[in-house]
Image (cartoon, rainbow, N blue to C red):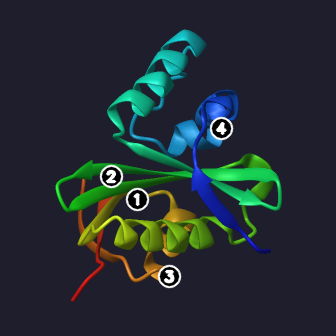
Amino acid sequence: MKLSIRKAVRSDCKAVWTWRNDPVTRANSRNTAKIPWRKHVSWFAETFERGNPQIFIVTAGRVRAGLVSLRMNGKRAEVSVNIAPSFRGKGVGSKAIALACKIAAKLGLVSLEAFVKKTNAASQKAFEKNDFVKNSCKKGLCKYCRRLVS
């Protein structure tokens, strides 16, 4: 499956909210609570004003397949991935992470980190496939790191 990645636009708001409130997404998130629509709309609009985090939409053809966000902190960023339910189990997560790494390098970032629940084997495998190294695990959350430049 060929994937592309683009910057999120305001019309992506509802899809992002739907994915975020999906039960599997919530179970694998640090914050497992449902996000109310109004709160999400406000947060989504603020991300465009602040520019941080930067949100990218992963597409398969013209269909939204998921998102990648980069929460910038100087020359580093925390990467988060959320794959649309209908695209899970198809290798999209791993490919989305690879696309995120390319974008991060183009942005001049030197390293990425991701936080993955110990119980989320699929995400752990996807990050490891993209040369992220498990750095530590505390309170059920594992930190993965990857340098982008040598």
Taking the image as drawn, is residue 2 in sight? Answer: yes
The answer for how far apart the CA atoms under marks 4 and 2 are is 23 Å
- Residue at image x 76%, y 74%? 2
- Residue 140 percent coordinates (x, y): 33, 52
Residue 72 higher or lower than 21, as above or below: below
Tell me residue 120's x, y (percent).
Answer: 51, 58
Amino acid type at circle 1 is Lys
- The quarter of the picture where the N terminus appears is bottom right
**SS category of the residue bearing label 2:** loop
Q: Tell me the kind of residue under disc 3.
A: Lys
Residue bearing the label numbered 2: 140
Indicate the quadrant containing the C terminus: top left, top right, bottom left or bottom right: bottom left
Name the one closer to the observer, 82 or 53.
Answer: 53
108 versus 24 height, above or below:
below
At x 81% / y 52%, what residue is drawn?
Answer: 63
- Return the residue at label 1: 118
| Local SS, label 1 | loop
Residue topped by disc 4: 19
Label 3 environment density (alpha carbons within 10 Å; few <14, some 14–19, many ≥20): some
In the displayed orientation, state which residue is furthest to the top. 38
Q: Position of residue 15 (x, y in %)?
A: 70, 34
